Amino acid sequence: METETKRHKGEGHRKRLRERFLASGLSGFQDYEVLELLLSLNTPRKDTKQAAKDLIETFGSLHRVLEASTRDLCRIKGVGPANSFGIHLIKAAADRYLETRLIDRDVVSDPDSLMAFLNQAIGYKSREHFMGIFLDAKNRVIACEVLFTGSLTASAVYPREVIVRALDHRAAALIFAHNHPSGDIEPSAQDVRITRTLTFALKFAGINVHDHVITGSNGYYSFAGQGQMAAFNREFDQLNE
């Protein structure tokens, strides 16, 4: 009888959460309530409130939960493979939504939309992801691709592969981006060397590099914003006079 009463209370609570969402979206929802609602889709007859709270407590934030692996998610009591699949599907759908909104958009004139996408797509990854945003002659986005993963080193980034992808997309220009899992957005000496190398290699192929953005939990760093892209371009021109 007690179990039956708890089940009815849980169903009533889920119904109220769904009604709140239908009335005003996620406005006013706490992060654990967002997860509670999401978990309820694959756990129809059990209370998911405690599991949602445990997820936030374990991983620290909603975005960390969305980035967590299936193995780590399933360590939480009340979270199974079906719940993990739902969480990862929502994250992937959000990434795809922001990416498709970028297509045909001039991100040089509208950098905020690009930063929102990068923050969502790679800003909180636990490993480094090096991404290329391919642009046409009017700086409109053609495609976004993760080109490399893992530590960003000269041995891991191949200019030839980047050029091939740019030519495949018929890109006139590129913006590079990668994340720093530590949250520290200051570029390393290796970041600077790789940016210079890629800029020079692509210029030989007639393709401009507009920027290299480093994103992390502390914000973002723009090579162009700091004048470094202009300096690389001047150096290239001087060396090839």
Image (cartoon, grey):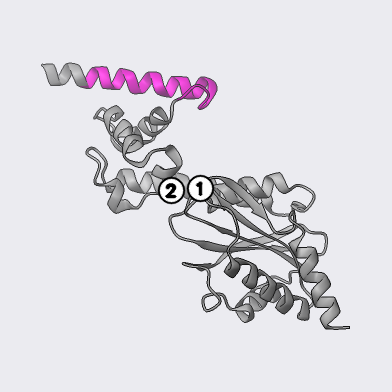
Kind of residue at disc 1: Ala
Q: Residue at x 56, y 76 (%)?
A: 154
Q: Residue furthest bottom?
A: 240
- The image shows residue 37 at horizontal and vertical percentages of 38, 30
Q: Residue at x 39, y 35 (%)?
A: 38
Which quadrant of the figure has residue 202?
bottom right
Which quadrant of the figure has residue 237?
bottom right
Give how far apart the Cα atoms at labels 2 and 1 are: 6 Å
The tally of labels here is: 2
Residue 97 visible from this viewpoint: no
Kindly identify which residue carries mark 2.
89
Question: What SS does tag 1 mark?
Answer: helix
Dot label at residue 93: 1
Left or right, 148 with reference to 142: left
Q: Residue at x 32, y 43 (%)?
A: 83
Question: What SS does tag 2 mark?
Answer: helix
Residue 179 visible from this viewpoint: yes
Q: Residue at x 33, y 19 (%)?
A: 13
Q: Which residues are magenta?
A: 7-29
